[in-house]
Image: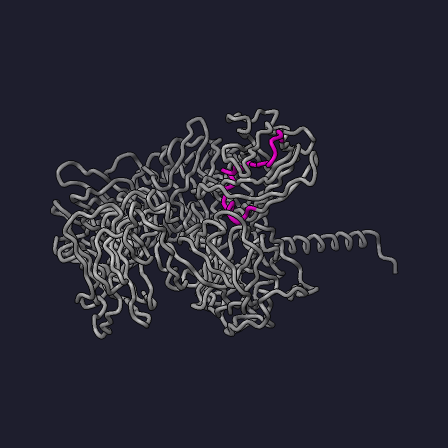
């Protein structure tokens, strides 16, 4: 039967609707991602020279605008040298053509690959040519040999990958390239340069917000998440944040209500219940929403407000601005799915204000312009159209509505039930966001010492005396909102020198860390609050007051000198108990329990955000074996200028140091042994558990690193057993000369010799006649397990086998591992590594350094390494995913687990102990296989670290070398078997073992 036409049309319309719905669903389900997840995108920047200099004419001449234009394209309009290349048979470093690039990458960009393309020709016979590439991070020029054109007046184009050392936005922005050449004939030979560019592949985090998707915190990975395909719960997944998705969610520029609670209300400014007082500009507010999956540290962020009276809010220095968090967060911990109300922002917001939220690296997190692009202006007629808000939250659509301060936006929402922004069992103070420091009279005082001043680092850190910090502790069973609290620093005579207006929440029984000036004071612990001001080393009074201005606690309340803490040892002042403040209730950090690193990586002798050392029993001195084979071997009391050490290949002045030597046949664990500079001096430094000295091994300890400082004229050094008895000691009573050490020969057992040559970590010997430094010493051969524990600057020779041969990780870097099972990255300063194979023996001499957080052996040139026989490849060390970190850095490991997260050039697996990032470097040519969440994968790779300079967040990753290093294990869920089930080494005929399933749709994960 023929159906009516209108029924056919309806069927077509219905079919089109179904297709549209399916397409729309696929758009959001591809790869298992939602718009709430960060999707890094690949950006390819082709940059040509922006300026330059030509010195081949005998003097430096800037390249003209025409010269630069001719370099931009391959058009045979070329910039030529002046034909003055040297005939000496060697490069003249003063004769070059320099090309300068200015890409202006943002600080947050992640650089994955940098390739230089250079096209030139020669006018006659050249002997050699090279490029010198400048690395800004280390102020180093790197040599890159280039090929000579096959004939005169013939163009040669060459690509050179410099990703091994040009690997940050800073490096790229400071990129300079010099061309140098030399010849063997006297004829004038010119070189002509037609094209030079730098291709930079880098990742910029982006996000797409659509009005049909609501971003909720329920999509985040949490400890309670259980995969539906297996009864075994997925373990806790702690991952490195890749995107800080904070959005401007709601704005009130024309307030219709008393949001600052000038009169009435619930005594909580900018809460859901406004007051009944007059409405002024202090009632304006802006709401932020964390639409991401990670907490955000807003310290260092800014909010710019551009209108006829522009102003900028610095979150670290809020002034009279009030912060109200919906879920008890803080500026240092803006939680996923949480709302932050910014009350009384600086300036006077116009109804056409343009708002820009900037991260700490100056990249834009979000921007909204009122009255532009479909966003309503802020003009209001009554409370029903008071706010301009995204609906739904985090969408791209704004509308006028009643204010929904601190909770989900909804134009149809009725007046909410008034609740505190952060409910606690403690009274909440009333704040008035005005310029007066006087709190309102309605605030209720807290009991004495509800919060105590728990620890004070008044003398600063070894890296910088200005790096002071203060720790508070909540002694109650409830969280306390610190908004309205103050901490003052004064001398007890004049008015308060410094008033710190606190904000944030301190959890029940928890700690709250205040760092001075910035969050680099303690690099591996995030501050809860940043303050300005200083504490004199001569003593100050600290006074903590609640919002009613009642003094809750003091530190050094009677004034005068600090009752505890040690300036020379940089040891903190720790509270002993919650009893009232008195000189007897404070002690100096004992040294056996410490945590945290200063901005130079030195251990901090304190316990920031941890229980004080006086609450932790000191190590029991018995039982221990009284071994006497570890002895003092060398002491340098008076180091000289750093330039004297350049002849040794060191990059830092060693400073005062102590050297130990093991004269016995067995390794010795000297954990809990102590180093002291003599009775009555600084407190002894307790060595950490697991400090092992191998037979015939040296152990170099810099005095600065352990809080010791020697007197040049008279002092002593003692090595102590855990019970304080003396193992060995040496004293001096006359002034020591610069760089003249006190040394033993033979090592560890000989007589003490004064005024010998300084030989840190090397065999001792006297000065040679006529030479201050004497003959250049040979670096000590050390196992990597021991060498990795030495300080940066130590000179060492390693004997190992290649695990990551050239050119997997670029022209400069290889990875090697020795019989101890520990590995390290080896960086070649000049030249290029020769071809090598996995398992090939390597001997290399250089000094230890830390670059981008990763420990490296810096080998200055090709004279300092040699390759040996090709042996069996090092065996991967089976580890748990949660063990990927400092203890495995540089090591070839085997790991497997369930895929829990995807990135463009990486995926994360979790085996129940934590998550590990499996990373695919572009230099290896191995691309990330097609994987899906819930699948089980195994991987073999080298643990590397890349710590960003802006956040100092440590980024550990397992770096894949070959396609056969990763393979899928059948099934889904968490696995415990850590034994690799596939060959992890490449064969000439090997093909990738990981093939995508025919039904598997690749997820849209562009490279970062």
Query: Is residue 840 depicted above or below 295 in this figure?
Result: below
Tell me the residue at 81%/51% (across/down).
Answer: 6
Residue 856 placement (x, y as % from top left): 44, 54
In magenta stretch: residue 736: no
Q: Nearer the viewer, residue 292 or 774?
A: 774
Tell me the residue at 44%/35% (across/down).
Answer: 304
Q: In the rendered view, does 960 fall on the left or right side of 956?
A: right
Residue 869 placement (x, y as % from top left): 54, 65
Tell me the residue at 18%/65% (across/down).
Answer: 726
Residue 691 placement (x, y as % from top left): 31, 65
Quarter of image, res 348? top left
Q: Which residues are magenta?
A: 162-189
Q: In the rendered view, does 508 fall on the left or right side of 1008?
A: left
User: Is residue 961 something that shows in the picture?
Assistant: yes
User: Is residue 474 something that shows in the picture?
Assistant: no
Q: Nearer the viewer, residue 902 or 721?
A: 721
Query: Is residue 526 depicted above or below 883 in this figure?
Result: above
Check the picture and name the quadrant holding the N terminus. bottom right
């Amino acid at each position: 039967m023929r159906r009516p036409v209108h029924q056919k049309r309806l069927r077509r319309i219905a079919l089109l609707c179904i297709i549209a719905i399916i397409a729309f669903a696929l758009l959001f389900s591809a790869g298992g991602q939602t718009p709430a997840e960060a999707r890094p995108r690949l950006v390819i920047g082709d940059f040509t020279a922006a300026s330059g200099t030509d010195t081949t004419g005998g003097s430096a001449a800037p390249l003209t605008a025409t010269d630069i234009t001719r370099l931009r394209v391959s058009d045979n309009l070329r910039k030529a040298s002046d034909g003055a290349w040297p005939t000496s048979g060697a490069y003249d470093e003063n004769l070059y053509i320099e090309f300068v690039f200015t890409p202006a990458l943002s600080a947050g960009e992640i650089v994955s690959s940098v390739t230089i393309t250079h096209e030139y020709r020669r006018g006659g016979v050249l002997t050699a040519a090279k490029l010198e590439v400048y690395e800004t991070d280390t102020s180093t020029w790197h040599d890159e040999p280039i090929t000579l054109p096959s004939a005169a007046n013939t163009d040669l184009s060459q690509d050179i990958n410099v990703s091994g050392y040009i690997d940050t936005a800073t490096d790229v922005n400071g990129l300079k390239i010099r061309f140098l050449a030399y010849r063997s004939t006297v004829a004038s030979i010119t070189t002509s340069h037609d094209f030079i560019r730098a291709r930079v592949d880098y990742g910029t985090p982006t996000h797409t917000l659509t009005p049909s998707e609501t971003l909720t915190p329920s999509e985040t990975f949490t400890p309670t998440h259980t995969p539906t395909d297996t009864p075994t719960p997925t373990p806790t997944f702690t991952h490195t944040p890749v995107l800080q998705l904070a959005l401007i969610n709601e704005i009130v520029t024309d307030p219709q209500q008393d949001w600052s609670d000038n009169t009435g209300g619930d005594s909580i400014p900018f809460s859901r219940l406004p007051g009944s007082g007059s409405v002024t500009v202090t009632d304006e507010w802006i709401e932020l929403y964390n639409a991401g999956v990670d907490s955000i540290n807003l310290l260092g962020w800014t909010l710019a407000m551009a209108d006829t009276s522009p102003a900028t809010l610095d979150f670290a220095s809020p002034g009279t601005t009030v912060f109200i968090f919906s879920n008890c967060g803080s500026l240092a911990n803006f939680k996923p799915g949480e709302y932050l109300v910014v009350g009384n922002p600086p300036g006077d917001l116009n109804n056409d204000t343009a708002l820009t939220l900037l991260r700490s690296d100056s990249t834009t997190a979000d921007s909204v312009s009122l009255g532009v692009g479909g966003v309503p202006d802020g003009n209001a007629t009554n409370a029903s159209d008071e706010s301009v808000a995204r609906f739904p939250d985090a969408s791209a659509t704004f509308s006028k509505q009643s204010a929904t301060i601190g909770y989900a936006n909804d134009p149809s929402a009725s007046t909410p039930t008034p609740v505190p922004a952060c409910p606690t069992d403690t009274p909440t103070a009333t704040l008035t966001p005005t310029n007066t420091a006087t709190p309102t009279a309605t605030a209720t005082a807290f009991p004495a010492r509800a919060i105590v001043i728990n620890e004070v680092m008044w003398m600063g850190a070894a890296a910088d005396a200005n790096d002071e910090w203060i720790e508070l502790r909540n002694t109650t069973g409830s969280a306390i909102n610190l908004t309205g609290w103050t901490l003052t620093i004064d001398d007890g005579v004049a008015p308060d020198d410094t008033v710190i207006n606190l904000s944030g929440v301190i959890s029940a029984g928890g700690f709250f860390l205040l760092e001075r000036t910035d969050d680099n004071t303690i690099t591996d612990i995030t501050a809860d609050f940043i303050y300005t001001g200083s504490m004199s080393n001569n003593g100050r009074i600290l006074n903590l007051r609640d919002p009613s201005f009642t003094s809750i606690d003091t530190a050094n309340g009677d004034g005068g000198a600090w009752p505890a803490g040690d300036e020379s040892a940089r040891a903190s002042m720790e509270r002993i108990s919650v009893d009232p403040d008195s000189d007897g209730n404070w002690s100096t950090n004992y040294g056996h329990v410490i945590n945290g690193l200063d901005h130079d990586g030195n251990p901090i002798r304190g316990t920031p955000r941890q229980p004080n050392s006086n609450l932790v029993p000191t190590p029991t001195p018995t039982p221990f074996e009284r071994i006497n084979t570890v002895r003092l071997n060398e002491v340098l009391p008076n180091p000289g200028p750093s330039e004297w050490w350049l002849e040794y290949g060191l990059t830092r002045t060693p400073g005062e140091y102590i050297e130990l030597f093991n004269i016995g046949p067995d390794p010795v664990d000297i954990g809990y042994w102590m180093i002291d500079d003599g009775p009555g001096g600084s407190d002894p430094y307790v060595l950490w558990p697991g400090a092992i000295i191998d037979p015939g091994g040296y152990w170099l300890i810099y005095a600065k690193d352990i809080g010791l400082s020697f007197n040049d004229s008279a002092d002593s050094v003692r090595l102590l057993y855990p019970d304080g008895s003396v193992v060995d000691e040496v004293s001096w009573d006359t002034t020591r000369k610069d760089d003249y050490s006190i040394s033993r020969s033979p090592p560890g057992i000989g007589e003490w010799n004064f005024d010998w040559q300084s030989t840190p970590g090397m065999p001792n010997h006297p000065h040679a006649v006529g030479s201050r430094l004497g003959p250049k010493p040979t670096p000590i051969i050390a196992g990597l397990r021991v060498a990795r524990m030495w300080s940066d600057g130590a000179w060492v020779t390693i004997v190992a086998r290649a695990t990551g041969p050239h050119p997997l990780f670029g022209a400069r870097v290889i990875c090697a591992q020795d019989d101890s099972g520990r590995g390290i990255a080896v960086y070649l300063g000049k030249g290029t590594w020769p071809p090598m194979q996995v398992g090939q023996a390597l001997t290399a001499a250089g000094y230890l350094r830390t670059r981008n957080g990763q420990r490296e052996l810096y080998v200055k040139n090709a004279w300092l390494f040699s390759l040996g026989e090709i042996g069996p490849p090092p065996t991967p060390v089976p580890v748990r995913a949660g063990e990927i970190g400092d203890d495995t850095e540089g090591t070839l490991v085997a790991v497997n687990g369930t895929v829990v997260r995807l990135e463009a050039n990486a995926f994360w697996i979790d085996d129940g102990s934590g998550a590990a990032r499996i990373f695919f470097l572009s230099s290896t040519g191995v691309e990330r296989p097609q994987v899906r969440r819930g699948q089980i994968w195994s991987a073999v790779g080298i643990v590397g670290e890349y710590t960003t300079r802006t956040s100092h967040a440590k980024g550990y990753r397992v770096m894949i070398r070959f396609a056969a290093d990763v393979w899928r294990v059948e099934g889904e869920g968490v696995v415990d078997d850590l034994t690799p089930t596939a060959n992890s080494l490449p064969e000439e005929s090997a093909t990738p073992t990981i093939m995508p399933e025919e039904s598997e749709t690749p997820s849209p994960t562009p490279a970062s």
